[in-house]
Structures are given as structure tokens and as C-alpha cells.
Image: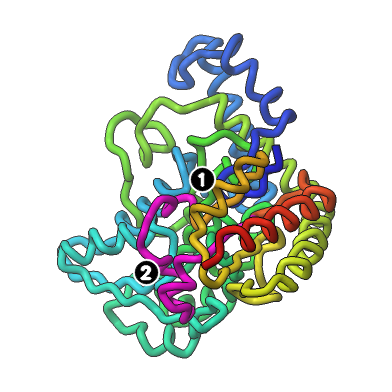
Amino acid sequence: MIYMDNAATTKIKDSVLREMMPYFTDFYGNASSIYSLGQKSRAAIENSRIKIANILNVAPSEIYFTSSGSEADNWAIKETLKEGEINHIISSKIEHPAVLNSLKYLEKKGHKIDLLDVDRYGFVDLDELREKIDDKTNLVSIMSANNEIGTIEPIEEIAEICKEHGVLFHTDAVQAFGNIDIDLSNKNIDMWSMSGHKIGAPKGVGILYIKDGTKINSFINGGSQERDMRASTENVAYIVGLAKAVEDAYNNLEKNTEYTENLRNYMLEKLLKIDKVLLNGPRDKRLPGNINISIENLKPQTLVQYLDMFDICVSQGSACAAGSIEPSYVLSAIGRDKDLSLSTIRISLNSDNTKEECDFVVDKLKDGIKKFSY
């Protein structure tokens, strides 16, 4: 199996699984229980919170565990509304569906939503952001890095603009964490989302960082978990696994990023020599493992299925939009026409991939393009 769809999900790391196992078998107590078995679960949760907070350079009280990045995005966007008012939220046209569909929901409720344009590489226009902010704006939400084309947005500049105007700033960092250096202590970020399954933790656990003092309501009502902010019996094993994955990602960031970026550039150079292949997104300032290409006159579903015959896993776009017959809204936003937007393959590498795998996949892509292009 050659797996090159790491932007969709990653394999659980062995080190993470080992850390999790005792909390499935031995230390299975409910963390809200006062007896010792339950308190071992409580200690595991709080130790995980401290470990993650130290890595991000924030206070443990600012880390909240969620079931996913999508939940974290929904919480940040929906629960910072000013009650009894028409709220104004600014985002971009290339956000993840967890953000865009939350905004559509709020728009139906009567709130004002502005989506910023992006240039042909996927970068937001900072001047347009400044123009859109007014005295009714209470939130800006811009992703740290795009899940389809890998564009790394100028988050520090965006956060500074928001601070200057007294506006809350949230960023979806689901694709960014583990791929770029993140230190929240020196950034004017009020809320920050991530998801464990993008960095070798299991599916079903994530984080919402909420800067102390940020006015935000609880998201799930019920018990007193997560300091009365998110009710639900805690998923102890997954939280422990997430903390280990965060630690591993942090400790190996420089080495893995350099390796993956070099591998991406090696593969990309080979791909761009193939006739009819076009790169989407920037050459620089993109996620280290991201390759997003459009192939003229080709149906990507056919190519993905052809590659699958050789046990090669790539995506025809975002995993959240797989199977859609509509053109990618991200590619439409950067100016690709409908045909090219529908003829797209996303390859996402990580440090587990090799040059030999890249060579094999490029050869099979060449064969598939010759076979299926029209």
C-alpha cells in the first residue's frame, strides 16, 4: 500500500496507540467519579492538557478537548455571537466546510457574513479585510492553511489587524498543526482549532484553544465537563493519544517538515514535466506535503480508481467533498475554470513516504493520464 492522502487522515502512530491502550483496558474509570479508578482518568486528562498547553505556550485553562476540528470550528463561530444583535462575521471563500456551513447557518438566522476573495494562489487580501471590518464586526475566522491547495495564510498579519480593530480572531489550524511551527503565546489569536487524526492520533478527538478572557458560551449543555463549557463524558484514551501525537509532532517538526518538503518538491518536479498537468496553489508558502494538480481533459475519479488498482491512495480533492460532481469551490475561488476544477488530484505526503514510492506513483499517473485523458 502506498498511502498519499495524509491530508484526509493519517495512520495512528505506534507510539500513540501504546500510550492509549491502558485507558481502554485498565484505567477505564469515568473521570467524573471520585474513587481512585476515576481519578486516574482525571489525572490523565489534566496531564494531557498540561502537556499540550506547554507545547503551544499557553495556559492549561485555555485548552478544551472536543470530538473533532469541525466541532471546534462550530463552537468558535456560533458561540461568540452577541445575543440580541445582528452579528457581522468575516471569513474567506476557501474555508473548510465546517466553517462555511456554520456561516451559512448563521446567515439564515439573519447575521451578516462577508467572505473575502483570494488571489490565484489562495491568499486572502489583507486590504479587503481592513475594508470589511466595521463597528458591528465581532469575529474574523481565517484558516491557517488550506486543506485542498495547501496555501499557508498570513495569520500573524490577520491577527494583528483584528487586534487593532478589537475584533475576535479564530483560525482553523487542522491542516497546519504538525506541518508548520505554531506558538500561540506571541500571536493575537483568540481561538484556534485542531484535529488529532491529521497528526497520527485517532479520529474523534480535537482541541479548541480559547484565550483566557474571550467571551464565548458553552457549546454542549449537560454535565460540568471541560470546566462547564463542553458537557460529555471525556474520551480519556483518545485525549491521552492526542497529547502523545501533539508531543511527537512538536519534537519531530523540523526534521519531518524538511524531509516532507524535499520529497514534495522532488515529486512535483516530475509531475510538472507531464503534459497537461497544472499546479494549483503557490510553489512557496504551502504545506510541506501538499501537491494539488489539475489535469486537462481527464476525469479524476477514473484516475483515482486506476491508481487504487496498484494500491495507491490519493484524493480527487478534499476528503470532505469526495464524490461531489460539483467543481471545487476552492479552485473556483482561485480562478480555475469548471473543467480544470473537476479534473483535480490531491496528493498529500508525510514523513512515512519515500522517493521510491513517489517514482512509482508518478509512473502510474503518467500511464493513467495517457490511458484516460480525452
Distance Cα–Cα, label 1 vs label 2: 19 Å
- Residue 302 located within the stretch drawn in magenta: no
Q: Earlier in the sequence, mark 1 or mark 2?
A: 2
Q: Nearer the viewer, residue 238 or 257?
A: 257
In the rendering, at what x and y percent does residue 250 appear?
Answer: 74, 49
Q: Which residues are magenta?
A: 319-347
The part of the image, by quadrant, that contains residue 22 is: top right
| Residue at the spot 44% in from the left edge and 72% down from the top edge | 339
Q: Amino acid at mark 1?
A: Ile
In the rendering, at what x and y percent does residue 138 appear?
Answer: 33, 71
In the picture of the structure, the residue carrying the numbered disc 1 is 207
| Residue at the spot 68% in from the left edge and 57% down from the top edge | 367
**Residue 327 vs residue 58: left or right?**
left
In the rendering, at what x and y percent does residue 340 appear?
Answer: 49, 72
Q: Is residue 334 above or below residue 152?
A: below
Whether residue 28 appears in this view of the structure is yes
Badge 2 crowding class, 10 Å Cα cut-off, few under 14, some 14 to 19, many 20 or more, is many
Q: Nearer the viewer, residue 257 or 235?
A: 257
Q: Is residue 249 above or below residue 126?
A: above
In the rendering, at what x and y percent does residue 271 appear?
Answer: 72, 67
The part of the image, by quadrant, that contains residue 1 is: top right
- Residue 344 located within the stretch drawn in magenta: yes
Q: Is residue 272 above or below residue 305?
A: below
Find numbered disc 2 in the image and state the secondary structure of the residue it sits on: strand
In the picture of the structure, the residue carrying the numbered disc 2 is 139
Q: Is residue 340 above or below residue 233?
A: below
| Residue at the spot 53% in from the left edge and 13% down from the top edge | 28
